[in-house]
Amino acid sequence: MKKKTVGLTASIILILILIAGIFSVAYGALTAEEIIRRRDDNEYYDSARAEAELVIINRNRRIVKTMTSYGQGDNGLVVFTNPRDRGTKFLKRGDDLWMFFPDAEDLVKISGHMLNQGIMGSDFSYQDMMEADKLIDLYQFELVGEEELDGRPCYVLEGTAFEGKEVSYYRRKSWIDKERFVGLKEELYARSGRLLKVMTVTKVQEIEGRWYPLASVMEDKLRKDTRTEFIIKNIEFNPEIPEGTFTLENLR
């Protein structure tokens, strides 16, 4: 009788080990690198043209700015179209950023500490605008778990910047939709571990065969009672962008 009990116990242990192994394989079906690559494939493009709104909310004050933007590789152009800022432009060429103010006909290069300032008073910084590389090229990611976010099952990953890479945030924690492979939430940290910003995606839509975030909210945790909504009204991937779009001459 004792031998049978020992044999039964051994069988149960073996079954539990096998079940644990099956769950381990299922959990590790995608590595952190594979998850980030699939997200990058969705959210990055060769070229794009978009019309968008920047809604800056500071306590009870709400300021709406509209814009048309063009992106191609490491280059980008943003043209503001709302009456107050009409004609104000940003040009990104590689690692350089310029801003043109039509009223003063003034062309300013944004660099140094100015890159940490908010774009047009928003929670998005100029440095945020500068990051055009894929996340897989900037951070070493680790899959740390799975959570549900607003009813959507998500992979939870933590990324640490590769040594020598110039990034706005040394560490980031990402919630990535398990089905659509779109980032739904980002916590952005300084090297010291201090939480700097939180970005939450509020609208995702399938466009031209890819899932893409169309609306998000950025909260700068170093500022009080403020947040900024970024809403894409229309976007076209891989359009033909006229030659000369990303030149200093085109800013004036």
Image (cartoon, rainbow, N blue to C red):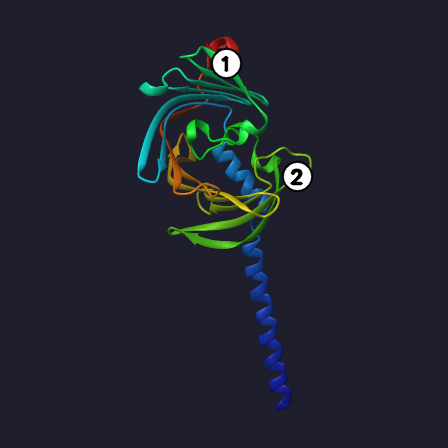
Which mark lies nearer to you, 2 or 1?
1
Q: Which mark is residue 38?
A: none
Residue drawn at point x = 59 percent, y = 81 percent:
8
Above or below residue 23? Residue 129 is above
User: Residue lying furthest right in this view?
Assistant: 164
Above or below residue 113? Residue 142 is below
Above or below residue 204? Residue 14 is below
Residue drawn at point x = 63 percent, y = 82 percent:
7
Mark 2 in CB contact with mark 1 (< 8 angstroms): no
Residue drawn at point x = 61 percent, y = 72 percent:
14
Residue drawn at point x = 65 percent, y = 34 percent:
165
Q: Position of residue 91 (x, y in %)?
A: 50, 18
Q: Which residue is mark 1?
A: 107
Dot 1 falls on a residue whose secondary structure is: strand
Q: Which residue is mark 2?
A: 162
Task: Pick the residue in front: 61 or 89.
Answer: 61
**Label 1: few (<14), some (14–19) or many (≥20) C-alpha neighbours in 10 Å:** some
What is the three-letter code of the residue carrying label 1?
A: Leu
Q: Is residue 132 visible?
A: no
**Label 2: few (<14), some (14–19) or many (≥20) C-alpha neighbours in 10 Å:** some
Q: Quadrant of the N terminus?
A: bottom right
Residue 168 occupies quadrant: top right
Q: Position of residue 125 (x, y in %)?
A: 49, 31
